[in-house]
């Protein structure tokens, strides 16, 4: 499976560290030079963001980084389509890889076969303290399933060709952070799962040195945005979780 790492041109230390990890594990990979959202003029936001979306505070200092993430990942997806890939593994440059990730990637391809049951698998578990419903075994060690009531983040994942085509066609502009949207199966109509145990850790394991959004400021919402988020994300994701978990159990 092809592996692509998104790295900002100015992030030399991260580039060196992630390169060392892949080389130590004997895994081939490619870098994609990510878009630095902080270099985007504000007047260009309309080209990439759904400014009518009530889910994002477009004046928030995190927005440039979120737009950079959005643009970068989507271009990696487009490249995968151009190369005719059936699926691709995408990583951000500040992750720690599990030592057995190469075998996992190989086993996922075998597990997928000609008609994969999944569209998207998150290799990073941002909610390790939450209950997990295992729905299918990848191998004797890893399984995919659902986290109550959902996962977030885009630090490491596998996405199929059909899912890429669907997402690129459905969302031309960013309605919410990509790290939320790709997990929102109830909204994007994809079969999204999380891997356990996780094979990708956000940041140096047990040390949070942040993501390339490069901000510790929380994304504050207005009361209207909070209400819309409740209607479009918080409530639907809970309903979806229970329906999917019970549906797979009885299928």
Image: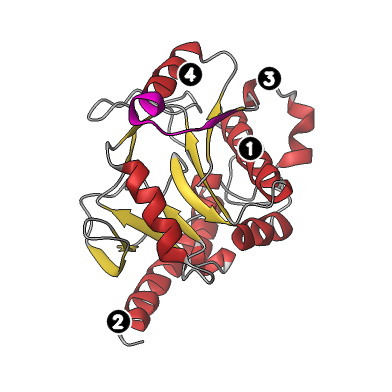
Q: Where residue 184 sits in the image (x, y, percent)? A: 50, 60
Q: Residue at x 26, y 25 (%)?
A: 207
Q: Which residue is mark 4?
A: 15
Tell me whether the residue at label 3 lies in contact with that at label 4, contact meaning CB atoms closer than 8 angstroms.
no
Estimate how packed mark 3 is, as few (under 14), some (14 to 19) or many (20 or more) residues with alpha carbons within 10 Å: few
Q: Which label's residue is closer to the chain start, 1 or 4?
A: 4
Q: Which residue is mark 1?
A: 58
Q: Which label's residue is closer to the chain start, 2 or 1?
A: 1
Between the residue at mark 3 and the residue at mark 2, the CA separation in whole angstroms equals 47 Å
Between the residue at mark 4 and the residue at mark 2, the CA separation in whole angstroms equals 42 Å
Tell me whether the residue at label 1 lies in contact with that at label 3, contact meaning CB atoms closer than 8 angstroms.
no
Q: Residue at x 25, y 30 (%)?
A: 205
Q: Where residue 136 sits in the image (x, y, percent)? A: 32, 69
Task: Decide which of 65, 156 is in the foreground and name it.
Answer: 156
Tell me whether the residue at label 4 lies in contact with that at label 2, contact meaning CB atoms closer than 8 angstroms.
no
Q: Which label's residue is closer to the chain start, 4 or 2?
A: 4
Vertical arrangement, residue 131 with respect to residue 239, above or below: above
**Is residue 27 part of the magenta span, yes or no?**
yes
Foreground disc of the pair 1, 3 = 3
Q: Which residue is mark 3?
A: 39
**Is residue 174 part of the magenta span, yes or no?**
no
Foreground disc of the pair 1, 4 = 4
């Amino acid at each position: 499976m092809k592996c692509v790492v998104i790295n900002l041109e100015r992030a030399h230390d991260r580039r060196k560290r992630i390169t060392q990890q892949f080389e130590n594990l004997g895994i081939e990979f490619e870098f994609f030079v990510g878009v630095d959202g902080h270099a985007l003029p504000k007047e260009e936001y309309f080209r990439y963001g759904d400014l009518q979306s009530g889910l994002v505070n477009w004046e928030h200092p995190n927005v440039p980084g979120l737009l950079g993430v959005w643009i970068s990942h989507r271009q990696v997806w487009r490249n995968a389509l151009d190369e005719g890939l059936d699926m691709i593994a995408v990583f951000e440059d500040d992750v720690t890889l599990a030592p057995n990730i190469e075998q996992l990637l190989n086993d996922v391809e075998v597990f997928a076969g000609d008609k994969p049951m999944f569209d998207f698998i998150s290799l990073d578990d941002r909610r390790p303290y939450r209950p997990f419903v295992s729905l299918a075994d990848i191998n004797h060690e890893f399984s995919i399933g659902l986290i109550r009531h959902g996962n977030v983040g885009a630090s490491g994942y596998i996405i199929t060709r059909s899912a890429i085509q669907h997402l690129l066609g459905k969302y031309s502009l960013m309605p919410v952070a990509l790290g939320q949207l790709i997990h929102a199966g109830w909204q994007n109509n994809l079969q999204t799962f999380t891997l356990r145990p996780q094979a990708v850790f956000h940041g140096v394991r047990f040390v949070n040195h942040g993501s390339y959004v490069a901000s510790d400021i929380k994304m504050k919402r207005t009361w209207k945005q909070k209400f819309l988020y409740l209607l479009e994300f918080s409530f639907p994701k809970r309903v979806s979780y229970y329906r999917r978990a019970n549906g797979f159990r009885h299928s």
